[in-house]
Image (cartoon, grey):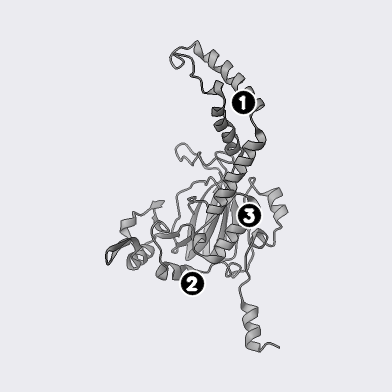
Amino acid sequence: MPTVQAAEKVATTPHRIPDFAALLAPVLPNDFFRNHWERQPLHLSRGGAHFYDGLLTNDDLESIISYADLRSPAIQVARDGGYVPTEAFTKNIQQGREVFNGVPDIAKVQSEYRSGATLVLNHLHRTWGPLRELCESLENDFSHLAHANAYLTPADTPGFAPHYDTHEVFVLQVAGSKRWRVFQPPLTLPHHTQPFTPAGYVPRPLLELELKQGDLLYLPRGFVHAAHTSEVHSAHITIGISVYTWVELLSELIASSKEFHQFRTALPLGFARREEMKKTLKEGFALGTRRLVDNCDSDRLIDDFLEKARSRIRRGGTFQTRG
């Protein structure tokens, strides 16, 4: 029979978040995919401040920044909507004949933070076990690449300028709180080659909310957002899901065209300057597309694509996100 002390220890042990169902609780995954995935944001207000303690805590973040063997760009400093030059907060250390470049200068990092900068830990899932376990589980379930960044922002400080991400975003508030503004997407489900362009963008407000400790916010790619801390500081994790789209699969079809002799022949002489060649190009394009689809080995093409996707997941993806 366990002692009282042992029982208390068991009772206060943070629960693990090893998979998507645990991350999304109490919302059921099937309900999420039916109502929100690639469709609309989800704000999950749990009222449980310690929900993410088994994943990452504010103390964990401070310890990682102060004592872990970080190197730029695993740690970055952001201010006024952009990143601070690395040399402003790092140093090079001579150790015998070896030089360790990009080592954070903790005094400078602390100074930047006190003056209103956000500290960013990129791809923390590579070195932090609970985040690695979760991202690996997401990749196995989704067949899309998952990564985790962490952000530590002082009180009353804006984050990045309004922008959208080209991947799915799950924001996990692990400490403090942050006010979020979400706007209608200027482009529905942008491809990763279609980054946000602020020029000419007219924001159409959709949501304004406060993300409190233990809460979750899901944003489909394309939804413009911006955040600002309240009277307390904020620490949050961003889980990004970089999806494979039909564009990637169709790109494999286009790449396979070089295996056919007719597609390796030159375009007609003078095609770029002679207006009458446009009709010839359109006819050739339509005919070539039909022949490509009719003659491609779709089974082999899809098998090759799947193997590439599996291989990339095994290696771990490298995607950048802004909080």
Q: Residues within 10 Å of mark 2 (few under 14, many from 20)?
A: few
Q: How many marks?
A: 3
Q: Residues within 10 Å of mark 3 (few under 14, many from 20)?
A: some
Q: Where does the N terminus fall, quadrant-wise?
A: bottom right
Residue for point 52% across, 15% down: 278
Residue for point 65% across, 88% down: 4
Residues at circles 2 and 1 in contact by the CB criterion of under 8 Å: no
Residue type beneath disc 2: Asp
Question: Mark 3 vs mark 2: which is more N-terminal?
Answer: 2
Whether residue 323 is visible? yes
Q: Which mark is residue 140?
A: 3
Q: Nearer the viewer, mark 3 or mark 2?
A: 3
Residue for point 46% across, 39% down: 197
The residue labelled by disc 1 is: 292
User: Quick one: SS at disc 2?
Assistant: helix
Q: Looking at the picture, how far across and down is residue 170, in whole percent?
A: 58, 55
User: Quick one: SS at disc 1?
Assistant: helix
Q: Residues within 10 Å of mark 1 (few under 14, many from 20)?
A: some
259, above or below 201, in the image: above
Q: Nearer the viewer, mark 1 or mark 3?
A: 1
307, above or below 289, in the image: below
299, above or below 111, in the image: above
Residues at circles 1 and 3 in contact by the CB criterion of under 8 Å: no
Dividing the picture into quadrants, the one containing residue 46 is: bottom right
Q: Looking at the picture, how far across and down is residue 47, in whole percent?
A: 63, 67
The residue labelled by disc 2 is: 59
Q: Looking at the picture, how far across and down is residue 237, in whole percent?
A: 53, 60
Q: Is 31 placed left or right of 181 in the picture?
A: right
8, above or below 60, in the image: below
Q: Residue furthest top?
A: 276
Question: Mark 2 vs mark 1: which is more N-terminal?
Answer: 2
